[in-house]
Image (cartoon, rainbow, N blue to C red):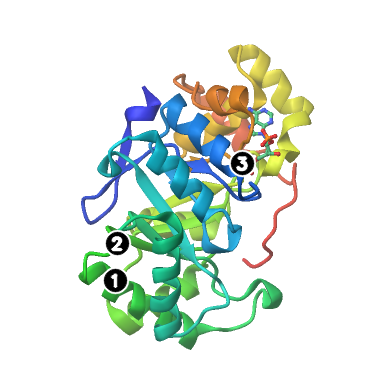
């Protein structure tokens, strides 16, 4: 069953194959309830970020669930505009405090550039932030570290400067937007690709071609999209605040045939493909 299956990061840490996404989930009741439903549904991997402004609500739901801390895999992220060593350490402490935990399972640099300056070169700042994440890893404050929205040259700059390879790269990934150059590079180098917006933030859900395929499998479009990520050895992070959909998004224990995977691989530009750099 998918909820109990894991991928293994290159340092041996196991990470549940589906994570619960909380981007665009409002702090307070919405995030608290959604996280509670997710834990009740059996998700054991929750993905948040400092900038989502919902870490406190997510953390409270985790605490109130009474599920043992070590049974839940928690990811959070360093804000994209923090590009200094000290700043990274400072924001890590803020996230830990917000979440009410004493360690994080996976800590990511949220993006290689601030969102106000997409595509700009922040290589030296990324290296500074990465050194701080390495310190957190060596100090056992985090079980694994990685990046998000990074391209090949952004990752190579980190490795060249520190000799330390990220364990994960979390990117916008869905049917029709598989970001081949960076995905291929990461998979060849044993860096796990996590798929955020695996439903293209909902844009794929009215697609007629996907609808036809979903009917063939007696599944929903969302389930086809999530299964597609898994068939591609990526880790989907579906977001929902709706209890039924949170449960339905775990019902992905089926296989998509080789032919249908090829068909899906050949669908291009069926939803928008931000962020913009290749
Ligand atoms: P909601 O939170 O109201 O369920 P993504 O994971 O790609 O970011 O997509 C999230 C969007 O898709 C949200 O708008 C979410 O709305 C919606 N969504 C999530 N799961 C499903 C589902 N199974 N069926 C329909 N819509 C879904």
Q: Please state, as top left, top right, bottom left or bottom right, where the C terminus lies in the image.
A: bottom right
Q: Residue at x 64, y 13 (%)?
A: 216
In front of the other: 128 or 234: 128
Is residue 180 visible to us here? yes
Q: Secondary structure at mark 3?
A: helix
Q: Which mark is residue 29?
A: 3
Residue at mark 1 to residue at mark 3: CA–CA distance:
31 Å
**Mark 2 lies within 8 Å of ligand 1 (Cβ measured):** no
Where residue 192 sits: x, y (%)?
A: 39, 52
Can residue 233 be seen at all in this image of the molecule?
no
* Label 1 – label 2 distance at C-alpha: 6 Å
Q: Earlier in the sequence, mark 1 or mark 2?
A: 1
Distance CA(mark 3)–CA(mark 2): 28 Å
Secondary structure beneath dot 1 equals: helix
Which residue, given by chain and number where applicable, does mark 2 sit on?
A: 142
121 versus 210 height, above or below:
below
Question: Would you identify the image quadrant in which residue 198 lies?
Answer: top right
The residue lying toward the viewer, choosing from 87 and 127, is 87
Q: Are marks 1 and 3 in contact (CB under 8 Å)?
A: no
| Residue 234 x, y percent position in the rendering | 45, 43
Determine whether the residue tagged by mark 2 lies in a helix, strand or loop: loop
């Amino acid at each position: 069953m998918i909820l109990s299956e894991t991928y293994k990061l290159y340092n041996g840490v196991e990470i549940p194959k589906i994570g619960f996404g909380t981007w665009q989930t409002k702090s307070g009741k919405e995030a608290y309830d959604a996280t509670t439903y997710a834990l009740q549904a059996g998700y054991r991997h929750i993905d948040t970020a400092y900038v989502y402004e919902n870490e406190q609500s997510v953390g409270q739901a985790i605490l109130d669930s009474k599920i043992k801390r070590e049974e839940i895999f928690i990811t959070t992220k360093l804000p994209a505009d923090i590009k200094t060593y000290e700043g990274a350490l400072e924001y890590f402490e803020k996230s830990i405090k917000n979440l009410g935990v004493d360690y994080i399972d996976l800590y990511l640099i949220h993006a290689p550039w601030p969102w106000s300056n997409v595509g700009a070169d922040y290589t030296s700042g990324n290296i500074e932030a990465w050194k701080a994440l390495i310190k957190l890893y060596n100090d056992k404050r985090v079980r694994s570290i990685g990046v998000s929205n990074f391209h090949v040259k952004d990752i190579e700059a980190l490795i060249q400067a520190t000799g330390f390879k990220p364990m994960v790269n979390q990117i916008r990934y869905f049917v029709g937007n598989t970001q081949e150059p960076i995905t291929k590079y990461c998979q060849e180098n044993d860096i796990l690709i996590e798929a955020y917006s695996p439903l293209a933030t909902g844009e794929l859900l009215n697609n007629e071609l996907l609808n036809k395929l979903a009917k063939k499998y007696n599944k929903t479009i969302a389930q086809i999209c999530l299964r597609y990520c898994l068939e591609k050895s990526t880790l989907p992070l579906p977001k929902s605040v709706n209890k039924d959909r949170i449960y339905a998004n775990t019902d992905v224990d089926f296989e998509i045939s080789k032919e249908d995977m090829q068909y899906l691989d050949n669908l291009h530009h069926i939803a928008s493909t931000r962020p913009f750099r290749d």
